[in-house]
Amino acid sequence: MQKAKAVLRHSVMFFLAVYFLGVLSVFAQTPRIISITPEQNELNVPLLTDISVAFDIDMDETTINEATFVVNASSTGPHEGQISYDNGARTATLDPIEDFDNGEAVTVILTADIRSSQGESLGNSFTWSFTIEANGGSGIFYVDTVYSVGGGASSIVAADLDNDNYLDLCVANDIFDSVSILLNDGNGTFFRHWVGPIGGSPISIFAADLDRDGDLDLSVAVYEPNSVLVMFNDGDATFTSQTDYPIGSIAWDLIAADLNGDTYDDLITANTDKISIFLNLGDGTFAPRSDYYVAGGAYSVTAADIDNDGDIDLACCAVDNLVILSNAGDGTFSIEGVYPGEPMLLSIFSGDLNADGHLDIVTSNQLYNSVSIYLNDGDGAFESHTNYDVSYLPWSIAGADLDGDEDLDIATANTDGHSVSILINNGNGTFLPQLVYEDIYSPYSVFPADLSGDGAMDLVLAIHQPDNIVVLLNLSSDCQYIPGDCDHNGTPLELADVVTMIGIYRGTADPQYTCDCPPNGSEFAAEGDPNGNCIAFELGDVVIEIAAYRGTDTASGCEDCPGPRRIAFDPGNDTPVVPSLKSRVKMQARSSTD
């Protein structure tokens, strides 16, 4: 009898245990992300910013760690930090140890190994990106330095290769079959550090930490023998270990991004007949490629979360069409949309151009010598585009906040036009007519980065022939002035300005404002130069100041100072006049909407 009771008791206990486990499983929730900081695709994020994610239920904080909460920056690589969890707010926060760099894109990956306090997995990984602020800049550039590299510089990137917090330069040379590394000395000048032969003609180069050892590696698309070459960083910006992965067709472009949410960057190439994807095996080696055939082939590709669903999608230039490939969440893709473009789309860039939280797309167009702006409708679709003229054969395109006004501008390297075009964003995804910088022979690639360390986004160009790279420095936005406003009160050509001008000319008063303008770098009182000869408060300036006050002449300004920020004031016209720039910078006005 006692034995029967014991058996019954154990049976009841077993039944209750199974029952309560079932109840718990019914009520166990899959955790959801309810907010992220910074927000998805946010612009102008501070250099030193905390990164946080809030969940809808209690989480197991031991599963939120450096392996499951990963931060990568486009120019400075992986960023580690102190991770904390606030139980009350259900919020995990990463406080980065190092600042980010001006203007770089930052990607955050939360893996599926993050679990709730009940042991439920996040389900799918979640990825989002944001862009660090640019501090200053006028959007006006001047040639700072020309550096000689190997023959046929075809592609260039700026990245911190030796972990000294300064951006270095990586150049692919398709004639000399080599890669050149130029290190930053900390003052914005560069010296040749390493040149490596690669046994083929490199077309495109990209920097990313492929093996997650804390330094940036290089991947190179090689024309012959049609392959991807992975070059591992020894930690000191030398690259002695190389691995080759065949593609089977010509790769025109190469990028890296984490496509399956495992925190390891995968490789993507745009080829003459397809898009190829090499998934990272978790150690910097790659699985056999997966191919996605695109009608007409692909010439350029960008990786971004186009539909804001927490994974990285792809967009490519496919002859005359913009093609969107949607990620299933695991690094496999399907063609989501094909949008008609202009003849021969060459290069592509993605970024939030109108600050609506959704990524837009820009392409450069060979035959029409233009760029096309595709604004995202909020669902990852691009039903129309607007064209803006640039110079001849815009081979490469890039986007960054070039004028320091908190929106993304556009730069193109125009190979046959021997020039660079700058399109300044009005803040809503429409653009001013181009500024053209001429006499830059045969640029193949353009890359924006803060090379001088002043916070402003500079440009570096790969010049195919005569085999060099050119650094264009961004003029400081501190040079904002009104010629003739000698007392610096914001209203020019008043009687007080005339009095101040004469006093300074006679030596009885001091200038209120100075401006350091190239090319000679001389500091002068910019508002005291109304005759525009870059020598302030001379007799000629006194004459012009008096005449402009009387309404018989117009104050201009030194042409070496930033044109769009320099306002010429004509007393006979209520509208401020933007004076013409130097002869090498031309403004051309035409845009059309398709």
Image: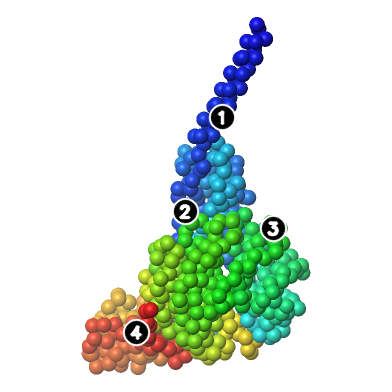
Spatial CA distance of label 4 from label 1 is: 74 Å
Q: Quadrant of the C terminus?
A: bottom left
**CA gap, disc 3 and disc 4:** 55 Å
- Residue drawn at (64%, 82%), measured in percent from left and top? 153
Q: Is residue 585 something that shows in the picture? A: yes
Distance Cα–Cα, label 3 vs label 2 = 30 Å
In screen coordinates, is 450 left or right of 556? Answer: right
* Residue found at x 51% / y 71%: 323
Mark sitting on residue 37: 2
User: From the viewer's perspective, is 393 left or right of 225?
Assistant: left
Q: Amino acid at mark 3?
A: Leu
Look at the numbered disc 3 and give the secondary structure of its residue: loop
Mark 4 vs mark 1: give the one in front.
1
Badge 1 crowding class, 10 Å Cα cut-off, few under 14, some 14 to 19, many 20 or more, is few
Residue 118 point in image, percent of width and height: 55, 36
Given the image, on which type of amino acid does mark 1 rest?
Answer: Leu
- The three-letter code of the residue at mark 2 reads Thr
Sooner in the amino-acid sequence: mark 1 or mark 2: 1
Q: Residues within 10 Å of mark 3 (few under 14, many from 20)?
A: some
Among numbered discs 2 and 4, the one appearing first in the sequence? 2
Mark 3 lies on residue: 281
- Please state the horizontal and vertical placement of residue 556, each as a whole percent of the image: 34, 88
Q: Is residue 472 above or below residue 3?
A: below
Residue annotated with mark 4: 578
At x 61%, y 18%, the residue is 11
Q: What's the residue type where badge 4 is placed?
A: Val
The secondary element bearing badge 2 is classed as strand
Which is more toward the observer, 59 or 426? 59
Label 1 to label 2: alpha-carbon separation: 36 Å
Which quadrant would residue 188 be assigned to in this image?
Answer: bottom right
Q: Give the label on residue 21, or none.
A: 1
| Precedes in sequence: disc 4 or disc 1 | 1
